[in-house]
Amino acid sequence: MDGKSDVKDKRKMQYQKLRRYFIDDKDCREKDSSHQTQKDFVNDTLVFTPYLDHKLHNKIERWNKKKRWMKDPPEGKQFKSSHGHQNEKVQQQKEFRKKLDPFPGDAPVSQEKIKKYRRGKKLQSTKTRSKLESYKLIEKEERQSLAVIQSARSELLLQEEAGFLEVEEGEDITELTQYDIADVVDITSAQKFFELNLNEFGPYRVNYTRNGRFLLLGGAAGHIASIDWLTKKLLCEINVMETIHDAKWLHQETMFAVAQKQWTYIYDNQGIEIHCLKILDSVLRLEFLPYHFLLASSNSKGYLSYIDVSVGKKVAGISTGLGRLDVMCQNPNNAIICMGHPGGTVTMWSPNVKEPLVKMLCHRAGVRAIAVDHTGQYMVTSSIDRTMKIWDLRTYKIMQSYKLGGGGGHLAFSQRGLIAAGIGNIVEVYNDCINNTMTVPYMMHQLQSTVHGLQFCPYEDVLGVGHGAGFSSLIIPGAGEANYDALEANPFQTKKQRQEAEVKLLLEKIQPEMIHLDAGRIGQMDVKTYHENIEKLQVSRPNKIKFEPKYKMKGKSKGLHKEHRKKGVVEKEKTQFIRDKLKQKQRVDKEKEHTQSQTCGTKSVLDRFIKSAQ
């Protein structure tokens, strides 16, 4: 009975739902209340009263017809809603979905752009220790490849474009002066050309920060000034009352190092002395390695020193034995220090080796200036013999040789491959002179006095020149990168961003042991040393002993007892192996002593010096 009553309740609910859904008018409801429904559950069907059955049937037929028309309307007709207006929105959506995309998928990216942003070759996932590590490596490579494609695709969104200055036929580009360029360009660019007249404390050494926002000036007569050169705001200005040989920014614009007459000092951006590095005396040139936090210095006694400024510790000190070291620069790609010498040679140094890694004979006369581009592939040198040579550091072969009007005392590479040379009181800039031979410089500018320092401002088309009469900021179109990476160097960073960048640099600090001539070999395996270690392990380790104890009665063959017996046999074999090795070593030592005594003949008092030397 319970089962039948449940079926009846279900049928009643179904009927009530149908009646509410399909019967809307009052007349039907009134008639529905006056007529009684008939139920027949014999064949599991619900039988309505004749009037209601006909009414519901018509309603259901109309509703089904309406649904068919909505899904697939006949040709030339459109579905009309109950309100009487055409459902145009539904039709438009259907037509839009039916249209095929003429350019399916993501927009294609050229392989040249992808190659520009790619970072080396992919790693092989088959050489991992476990499947989990291989899956992780595959996911990492996929993320990197996606980042490369997105970087190449987002290049369209970059705001600035790089370009060089071009003139019409028959015009000489060298006749264009800085005043002509400043009159033509916009107001913001015109303000980048300015001159500071500082006649009393020159000549000046110049240095820009890594983001190109701040400028440091160091006069030979003791004047030091740090400037936000874009806004022309003076950060600090002091006079140390001592000769200054060089000045360099450290990892941030909050500190800078100054090589003074006797020692090297570190100041903050307010001009307050923080440290006095007495271990760096008589320094002539300074170079700061930002990723290693190393301050490299060369002095007048031929001594090269490395100081870790993050901990204040001396990392290395090398006596070159090559005389006065007043020509020095760094390779930004691998942090190798390059130095020029009076004999025409150029040497390359690392803090891990006491001897030069490379020694090149570049000129027949003394080297006056060196510069290396940011890719670490090309090096330019100038000499007293008025020659400027460009070298390929991958093959150490000469690419171009130019004859200058005088000895190039200072050289500088820009981010876009331009080369600036300071010849007396004239600054010459050369464009595309590495792969092609140029006969005329790209730009020229004459100063009031002799050039004493050159540097291109990063991410700006500006060349900073320090000379005896002060400082000059020159506009060089196409010199700097048009767009900057804010995660690497942000010229408009806030105080909070600067603090976070400093912490990140310290966390990602590279140890001095990682400095190598070939930066690509750091992640590779030293195959020779690996094979030697494997051979030593194979010789020093005894062979594996396969010993299975015999079965014994009375519980003596239990698991623990068997393991104890195995261990005893293995230990016994190991001790015997070690004894044999010691005996063999003693025998070899005796044979060496016997051969040495035969070669030496009669013993002498000086034999002890021979043994110590060996």
Image: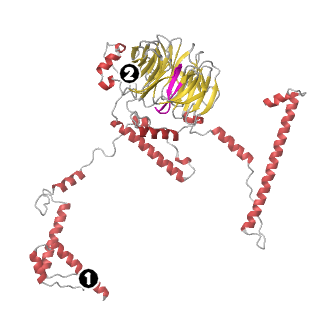
* Pointer 1 local density, CA inside 10 Å: few below 14, some 14–19, many at least 20: few
The disc placed on residue 400 is: none
* The quarter of the displayed image where residue 530 is located: top right
SS under mark 1:
helix
Return the x and y of residue 277 as percentages of the image width and height: 58, 28
Q: Residue at image x 72%, y 67%?
A: 559
Residue 26 is a magenta residue: no
SS under mark 2:
loop
Residue 254 is a magenta residue: yes
Q: Is residue 19 left or right of residue 484?
A: left
Q: Is residue 112 left or right of residue 540?
A: left
The disc placed on residue 476 is: 2
**Looking at the image, which is closer to me, 408 or 171?**
408
Q: Is residue 587 left or right of residue 427?
A: right
Q: Quadrant of the C terminus?
A: top right
What stretch of residues is rendered in magenta?
Answer: 240-258
Q: Which residue is mark 1?
A: 9
- In the image, residue 475 sits, relative to residue 490, either above or below, namely above
Gap between marks 1 and 2, in whole Å? 92 Å
**Looking at the image, which is closer to me, 138 or 339?**
339
Q: Residue at image x 46%, y 20%?
A: 454
Return the x and y of residue 126 as percentages of the image width and height: 54, 48
Q: Residue at image x 73%, y 69%?
A: 558
Q: Amino acid at mark 2?
A: Ile
Q: How is the image coloured?
A: secondary structure
Q: Residue at image x 62%, y 31%?
A: 316
Q: Quadrant of the N terminus?
A: bottom left
Q: Is residue 198 left or right of residue 64?
A: right
**Foreground tag (1 vs 2):** 2
The answer to whether residue 183 is seen in the rendering is: yes
